[in-house]
Amino acid sequence: EAQVTQNPRYLITVTGKKLTVTCSQNMNHEYMSWYRQDPGLGLRQIYYSMNVEVTDKGDVPEGYKVSRKEKRNFPLILESPSPNQTSLYFCASSPGTSGREAFFGQGTRLTVV
Amino acid sequence: GQQLNQSPQSMFIQEGEDVSMNCTSSSIFNTWLWYKQDPGEGPVLLIALYKAGELTSNGRLTAQFGITRKDSFLNISASIPSDVGIYFCAGLNQGTYKYIFGTGTRLKVLA
């Protein structure tokens, strides 16, 4: 089954404790991206990657890091999480390098206390 | 960061009614997309639009890419209870490859 898989689905952590949210897709897509969803703000793009080893900042990249060492994986790293990073996070992938027609994962609900 | 203005924010409608929502931007986009999000799920693509003026249908859904490239519209005909959810528009600037999403329209259907 074609899918984007995020782990974990739910995470509660403490301020300053480094964490990684994994994202993997099995559709051989070039483009992958991360979003955060907050009430009233819709989805905001954090980082995106047009291909392996190519990443760029979205609209809200502060406090996040990403890497794209393999085509299928695009982990999101929070080096020192803070409470304002409490949010619902989505990973998505798209065929081609232009980002059209995104397929989303199930989401990761992160709470930073 | 940039966001798209999506309206209405929420709407209650009777089953069987038609629904319209729209999205506007101060910037030009090369691609407009419409997604639906069910509770506890990620957004799912409904319709993608690639040319100014384009009108595309997907079952009871019809979407249009505005001629100015700064807006898009989504219509749902004869709504049914499973249409409940949040609808998002998204613009893709192919110069920057960045995705910009609207703030969403929450649709509730009364049976």
Image (cartoon, coloured by chain):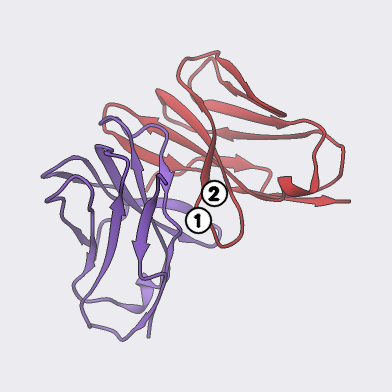
Chain colours: A purple, B red
Question: Residue at label 1?
Answer: A41
Q: What residue lies at 80% left-to-right and 39% top-to-bottom?
A: B79
Q: Is residue B85 above or below residue B60?
A: below
Q: Which numbered dot is residue B103?
A: 2
Q: Is residue A35 above or below residue A102?
A: below
Q: Position of residue B11 (x, y in %)?
A: 76, 48
Could you say which is closer to the camera, residue B91 or residue B79? B79
Q: Position of residue A66 (x, y in %)?
A: 19, 57
Kindly indicate the quadrant of the structure image that contains residue A67: bottom left
Q: What residue lies at 57% left-to-right and 27% top-to-bottom?
A: B72
Q: Amino acid at mark 1?
A: Leu
Q: What residue lies at 23% left-to-right and 54% top-to-bottom?
A: A74
* Number of numbered markers: 2
Q: Is residue A110 left or right of residue B69?
A: left
Q: Is residue B24 left or right of residue A98?
A: right
Could you say which is closer to the camera, residue A88 or residue A38? A88
Local packing at callout 2 (Cα closer than 10 Å; few below 14, some 14-19, many 20+) is: many
> Marks 2 and 1, Cα distance to the nearest angstrom?
5 Å
Q: What residue lies at 20% left-to-right and 77% top-to-bottom?
A: A18
Q: Position of residue B64 (x, y in %)?
A: 60, 21
